[in-house]
Amino acid sequence: MNKEDFCFSNLGWVRKVYLILMWLLTLAIVVFGFSYALSAKTDSPPLIAYILFFVLFIGFSAWKHFTIVKRKSIQLGVIAVIDLFSVNILSFIALLIFADVSKKEQVALIASK
């Protein structure tokens, strides 16, 4: 196994479930957010503000997905701290565990060479 073999299919089941739930939640937030934004009153923020929020939210989810799949342990630590600031404690703990597992997988990969 080499570093290019790090992909979604060879993740453990816990990380797969985490990613699937993360994308389902992201999809739900975007769908409900857009429906709210389209039906909002005139005194609500402009539609472009909602679109910007959703682009940033989807981008953050994509970054999280990429770092988990590619086992980027340092980036996982950074994302964990961002999740901590957003008061997402369960995700913070999960990402720290994923970072530790990813680091061990990288060390095992180096040791196998």
Image (cartoon, rainbow, N blue to C red):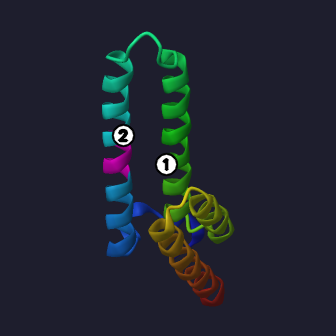
| Residue occupying the point 31% across, 24% down | 35
Q: Is residue 93 above or below residue 8?
A: below
Q: Name the residue under label 2.
A: 29
Question: Among all residues in the image, which is located at the extreme top?
Answer: 42
Please name the amino acid that badge 2 sits on. Answer: Ile
Give percent across and percent down for residue 97. Answer: 52, 79
Q: Nearer the viewer, residue 23 or 81?
A: 81
Q: In this view, does 99 lie above or below 85?
A: below
Q: Is residue 55 above or below residue 63?
A: above
Q: Are marks 2 and 1 in contact (CB under 8 Å)?
A: no
- Residue 3 falls in image quadrant: bottom right
| Residue occupying the point 32% across, 57% down | 21
> 4 left or right of 111?
left
Q: Nearer the viewer, residue 41 or 35?
A: 41
The nearer-to-camera label among 2 and 1 is: 2
Give percent across and percent down for residue 42. Answer: 43, 9
Quadrant for the C terminus in the image? bottom right
| Residue occupying the point 31% across, 33% down | 32
- Residue 9 falls in image quadrant: bottom left
Query: For the residue labelled by badge 2, is the local secondary structure a helix, a strand or a loop?
Result: helix
Give percent across and percent down for residue 90. Answer: 45, 70
Residue 100 colored in magenta in the image? no
> 111 left or right of 35?
right
Please name the amino acid that badge 1 sits on. Answer: Ser
Q: Mark 1 points at which residue?
A: 61
Start-end of magenta stretch? 23-27
